[in-house]
């Protein structure tokens, strides 16, 4: 099965190799990957070729900590607009929820990531039961390190997980793993997971920017729709986020912008178990719950941004979603 990886996701591997004095272009070309695609927005690589790239990089460096070093170089730009949406999220919980929703931006394989509330905090883990190409140990090393790097960028350098479970065997450089993660690590475990403290995951972030996060969501939805022509949900959701402030966001309007008939749009949404009305309501609800947490956005502004004609209409919808008015929710 053909799976792809966002080409820019390998940019940190390139940077790490370059810093080590290795010929990055040669290594990428030997993996049959176009080196220029690393810096081409939205470009993608065949996953089997990315696996070969990692094998060649390991062979060239002989570094058992290569994945850890690559993850430490991670930058939000490596994950398309999703990386910037992470930084603009209100809390780490919201950031992780975005990653769960939009993981296909990075990889189109059938891996899923899960965020689960547990008594000890929040458990983040990979579900690999349906994957075509299971990531190698070194790629998971990068993923673990990159997640913690992003958390530290958002919440502060003192951030640390409570514990990690890694399916990989104990690496030769285990001390470097412990120094970086600053948490107990269980190797040869039955899953790849990180346990995070509840308090810091739910705390407001200083980098929060709800309007920027909204715009990044729209960009990601539009990108996913272009990546998968059958992904009508992302296509409609992207158009809704863009058009809601215009006021009259109708099914006819969205169908026209997507170059399809209303009947075709209805049929394709029905195939996903949805109606346009449900998707419109879900999109408004999700945006409203984010907006209400930002005290700089007034109730009247929320009304406009969500496409309601009157504050009373918005308040009724919000009470239906949450059991409270927007003002009551904000006070709470």
Image (tube, rainbow, N blue to C red):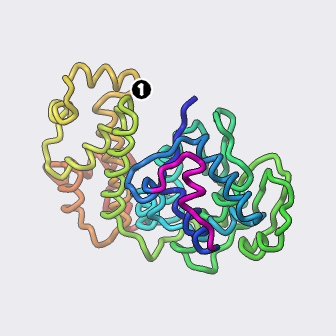
The residue sitting at 55% across, 51% down in the picture is 29
Indicate whether 160 appears above or below 269: below
Q: Nearer the viewer, residue 16 or 244?
A: 16
Numbered circles on residues, count: 1
The residue sitting at 36% across, 53% down in the picture is 217
The residue sitting at 86% across, 65% down in the picture is 172
Q: Nearer the viewer, residue 318 or 37?
A: 37
The N terminus lies in quadrant: top right
Where, by quadrant of the figure, is residue 298 drawn?
Answer: bottom left
The stretch drawn in magenta includes residue 29: yes
Indicate whether 261 appears above or below 121: above
SS category of the residue bearing label 1: loop
The residue sitting at 45% across, 61% down in the picture is 83
Q: Nearer the viewer, residue 50 or 237?
A: 50
Span of residues in magenta: 21-35
Indicate whether 144 appears above or below 20: above
> Where in the figure is residue 198, as x and y percent of width and height?
63, 65
Q: Is residue 148 visible?
A: no
Q: Which residue is mark 1?
A: 272
> Where in the figure is residue 264, as x and y percent of width and height?
25, 20
């Amino acid at each position: 099965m053909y799976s792809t990886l966002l080409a820019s996701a390998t940019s940190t591997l390139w940077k790490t190799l370059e810093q080590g004095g290795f010929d990055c272009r040669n290594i990428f070309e030997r993996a049959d990957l176009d080196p220029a695609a690393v810096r081409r927005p939205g470009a993608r690589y065949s996953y089997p070729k990315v696996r070969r790239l990692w094998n060649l990089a390991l062979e060239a460096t002989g570094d058992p900590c290569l994945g850890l070093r690559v993850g430490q170089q991670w930058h939000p730009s490596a994950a398309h607009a999703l990386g910037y949406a992470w930084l603009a999220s209100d809390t780490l919980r919201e950031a992780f929820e975005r990653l769960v929703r939009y993981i296909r931006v990075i990889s189109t394989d059938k891996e899923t990531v899960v965020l689960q509330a547990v008594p000890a905090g929040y458990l983040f883990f990979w579900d690999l039961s349906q994957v075509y190409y299971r990531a190698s140990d070194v790629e998971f090393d990068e993923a673990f390190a990159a997640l913690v790097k992003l958390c530290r960028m958002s919440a502060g350098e003192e951030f640390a997980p409570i514990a990690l479970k890694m399916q990989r065997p104990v690496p030769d450089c285990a001390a470097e793993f412990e120094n970086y993660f600053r948490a107990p690590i269980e190797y040869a475990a039955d899953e790849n997971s990180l346990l995070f403290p509840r308090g810091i995951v739910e705390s407001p972030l200083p980098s929060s920017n709800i309007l920027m996060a909204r715009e990044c969501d729209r960009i990601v939805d539009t990108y996913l729709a272009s990546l998968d022509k059958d992904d009508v949900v992302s296509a409609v959701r992207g158009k809704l986020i863009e058009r809601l402030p215009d006021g009259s966001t109708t099914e006819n309007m969205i169908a026209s912008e997507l170059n399809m008939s209303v009947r075709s749009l209805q049929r394709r949404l029905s195939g996903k178990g949805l109606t346009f009305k449900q998707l419109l309501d879900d999109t408004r609800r999700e945006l409203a719950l984010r907006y209400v947490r930002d005290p700089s956005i007034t109730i009247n502004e929320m009304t406009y941004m969500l496409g309601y004609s009157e504050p009373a209409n918005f308040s009724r919808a919000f009470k239906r979603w949450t059991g409270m008015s927007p003002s009551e929710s904000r006070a709470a």
